[in-house]
Amino acid sequence: MEIIGKGRTATVYDYKEGKLVKLFEPFIPKSAIERECNNALVINSLGVNSPKCFGLVHIDGKDGICYQYLEGITLLQHLEAINDFSFFLESFVEIQQKINASTCNNLNSYKEFLKMHVTSKNLLKRIDDLPDSDHVCHGDYHPGNLIVNGEQEVFVIDFMNVCKGPKEYDIARTYFLTVLEKVPNPELQKAQEALGEAYLNASGVTLEQIQPYLDVIKSTREIELKN
């Protein structure tokens, strides 16, 4: 099989008949792979544009997931190529809002993800004190996880961190990933700030509303990157 992508946790292969397989490294627990498969099926069920999940596979001694193969470029690459910010922002916000509008009890709470590497009692309490909710959250929603095909249709990918929680958590996570994690280039930093303001306005939330989540996300992210 031809490799079409490789990361720290998995390698993606062109499989057959419009499908790909994502085979995980041995250190990834099978329970985590099964959870991603379930997450993908949940997203599929929402009617959101997403690659169809065909279920679990075991190939060459590795566990994985079989997905529909989507050809295209990321939404960020599309913005760089076409320079159509209106299309970018509308697509970016619309898909996330459709995800967040749905509810599902068959998902892990966002608090479980935040607690994954945390040992501080103070930080654990701050996480517990955040609101609970059963709205679907993507958990890793940024322009690199959206694919634009040749028909200008936009699809969301990457379902490892899908969870349930308040929509404000998902928006805060996106804001953190796209705005607060700074890139070295000063010009790109200006673009990040402009995107952040436009994104929050289009999403209908204020920075004050997501600040409690941002504070916790920042603290847990620092711990996550050390592990």
Image: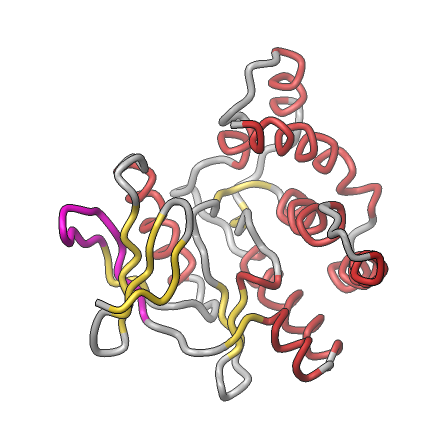
- Residue lying furthest bottom in this view? 151
Q: Can you give x and y, in whole percent of width and height, for residue 37 in the image? A: 32, 51
Quarter of the rendering occupied by the N terminus: bottom left
Tell me which residue sits at (69%, 79%) in the image.
Answer: 87
224 w.r.t. 75: above or below: above
Residue 159 shown left or right of residue 56 in the figure: right
What count of labels does the image hold? 0
> Which quadrant holds residue 43?
bottom left
- The answer to whether 214 appears left or right of 220 in the picture is right
Q: Residue at x 61, y 11 (%)?
A: 121
Name the outermost residue toward the top.
Answer: 121
Residue at figure coordinates x 30%, y 47% from the top left: 24
Within the magenta stretch, is there residue 213? Answer: no
Report the predominant secondary structure element of the magenta stretch: strand
Left or right: where 111 falls relative to 3? right
Q: Camera-side residue: 188 or 116?
A: 188
x and y percentages locating residue 72 in the rendered image = 47, 78
Residue span colored magenta: 56-68
Q: Quadrant location of residue 79?
A: bottom right
